[in-house]
Image: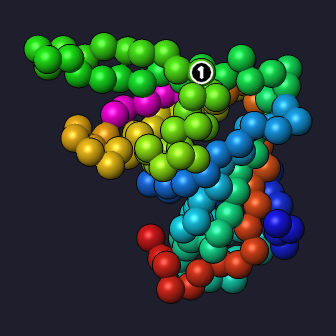
Amino acid sequence: MNFVHCNTDEKYLTLHDCVAERAYFEDGKLGFEFHDGFWISPDHPDSNLPNLVKTDFSKVEYILKDGVDDDVTVYVFKKNLFKKIFRVEWTIKKLINNINNGKCKLVFLYQYIDYDSRIIECELELNNKPYYWECVLKIPAHEVNYYWNNLCEDKPW
């Protein structure tokens, strides 16, 4: 799909509470698709709206530093029978397969950016109990591209 807008300036964009319903890894890029869009600031040059609003269908692509999916770390936090939390490491392939097979959706919460990497706090939304697992992504990406077509005035923050 071709998009009208592509932006790399993250100061005008946020994925907070946005739900990725499809994911992929191709040509050194880790991508997430958002059927319900992501948030665009009213200060964005392409926005003439007074509020923070969502886009229509959109995607985000992280251009991985070395172009290798093994560099991405996925930590999933689960509870055992004794309600103790433990961390399980997944491959990015496992996360992508679980998202694309409908076993979960990835809800973005908070993102911390360093020079060439990102740490993203997320939740995996599940179809059955426990209904969600906390998740952390460590993505070594020197560039991120945000793609969308339209701003949805009827979807303000």
Front position in the image: 126 or 48: 126
Front position in the image: 49 or 111: 111
Point out the image quarter for the N terminus. bottom right
Q: Is residue 109 above or below residue 94?
A: below
Q: Is residue 128 left or right of residue 23?
A: left
- Residue 27 showing in the rendered view: yes
Which residue appears at 59% of the width and 81% of the height? 152
Point out the image quarter for the C terminus. bottom left
Which residue appears at 76% of the width and 61% of the height? 147
Secondary structure beneath label 1? loop
Front position in the image: 10 or 26: 26
Which residue appears at 58% of the width and 65% of the height? 35
Image quadrant assignment for residue 120: top right
Amino acid carrying mark 1 in the image: Thr
Q: Is residue 134 above or below residue 129?
A: above
Q: Is residue 39 left or right of residue 126?
A: right
> Which residue is at the far bottom?
154
Q: How is the image coloured?
A: rainbow
Q: Is residue 94 above or below residue 155?
A: above
Residue 30 in the image, given as x and y percentages of width and height: 73, 38
Residue 83 in the image, given as x and y percentages of width and height: 14, 19
Mark 1 crowd level (few <14, some 14–19, many ≥20, 10 Å Cα) = some
- Residue 114 showing in the rendered view: no
Residue 111 in the image, given as x and y percentages of width and height: 55, 38
Image quadrant assignment for residue 95: top right
Q: Which residues are magenta?
A: 133-138
Identify the residue position indicated by label 1 in the image: 91
